[in-house]
Image (cartoon, rainbow, N blue to C red):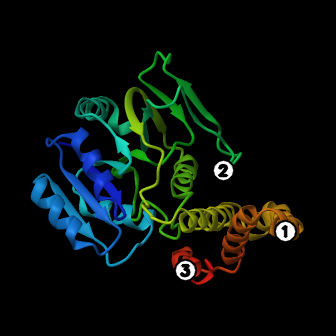
Amino acid sequence: MSLTIIIISYKSLEKLEKCLSTIGGNFKIVIVENSNNNKIKEIIENKYSFCKVIINDKNLGYAAAANIGLKDINTQFALLLNTDTFIKETEINEIEKEIANNGDDFALATPIYDDLIDFSMNNEFDKNLAKSELNYKETNNRKKVEVVKGCSLVINLNKFNSNQIFDSNYFFFYEEIDLCKRIKDLNENIFVFSKIKIYHGNASSLNSNDNDIYDNFRNWNYYWSRFYYFKKHYGFHKALIQHLSKLLRFFVTAIFTYLFSKKKFKTNKYRFLGLICSILRIKSSKSNKILETTTN
């Protein structure tokens, strides 16, 4: 078997079991649990003998957790999944057939999401990466693209020189965009397997009981990661120019939203905090503590 499945989880036992129920027991699966919840490890490994659970001492973020899982495996290919994805065993078998027939000519690939009429990854993240579009009428088994979504990724480890496939400076958001950009710069291929389907529940592996805190977390990290991405690939000054209008907009709208829309004010507040922290080189892994101390 040339493929190992890696699932990144954060206190998501119910989602994790639903994900595993569709995969079946014929594949090696490594689960990286981004919390120190040993109960999850005990439940999963006792119930699913084909699974290995790695417990992190704390939430390290998606990119760092993915690197831990990728470093643990000894197959050439990995299928990296979120807990809210559902893929049938027959579809994974089709991925293995693609690997057997064409595995050497791509660095990254993904199945198509069957909950979308059209698969589209637009270029709002980086206009230098071409927009990816296709639909179920595609006649080819695969289509070359420049950017894909990160909830399900087939990674060819032979195309990378380091065990650190993802940039672990990203805590949440942009880690797959960064990977796609680096693959493009290396002139390697990225494909969508347009005849292989996966369902994405469109929810994060982060499973918080407090929606406000979760929204704050997302807003903070999106703008932290966005600035870091542009700084990394295009330089600090270009990144700053790219985000000046957003900084000005946050300031201009602050008073109005505070008076008339507290929810919008809070959204802009955490976006502003994330952006400022990224500019000041405060690590994205600090976002949990920052949010805990500023939620009130």
Q: Find residue 131 and name its label.
A: none
For badge 3, the amino acid type reads Glu
Residue at which label 3 appears: 292
Q: Position of residue 267 (x, y in %)?
A: 70, 64
Q: Earlier in the sequence, mark 3 or mark 2?
A: 2
Quadrant occupied by the N terminus: top left
Of circles 2 and 1, which is in front? 1
Q: In terms of image quadrants, where is residue 280?
A: bottom right
Residue neighbourhood size for the residue with mark 3, other residues' Cα within 10 Å, grouped as few (<14), some (14–19), many (≥20): few
For badge 2, the amino acid type reads Phe
Nearer the observer, 129 or 120? 120
Q: Earlier in the sequence, mark 2 or mark 1?
A: 2
Residue 174 appears anywhere in the view: yes
SS at badge 2: loop
Residue at which label 1 appears: 259
Q: Earlier in the sequence, mark 1 or mark 3?
A: 1
Query: On screen, 95 above or below 44?
Result: above
Quadrant occupied by the C terminus: bottom right
Q: Position of residue 215 (x, y in %)?
A: 58, 62
Residue at which label 2 appears: 125
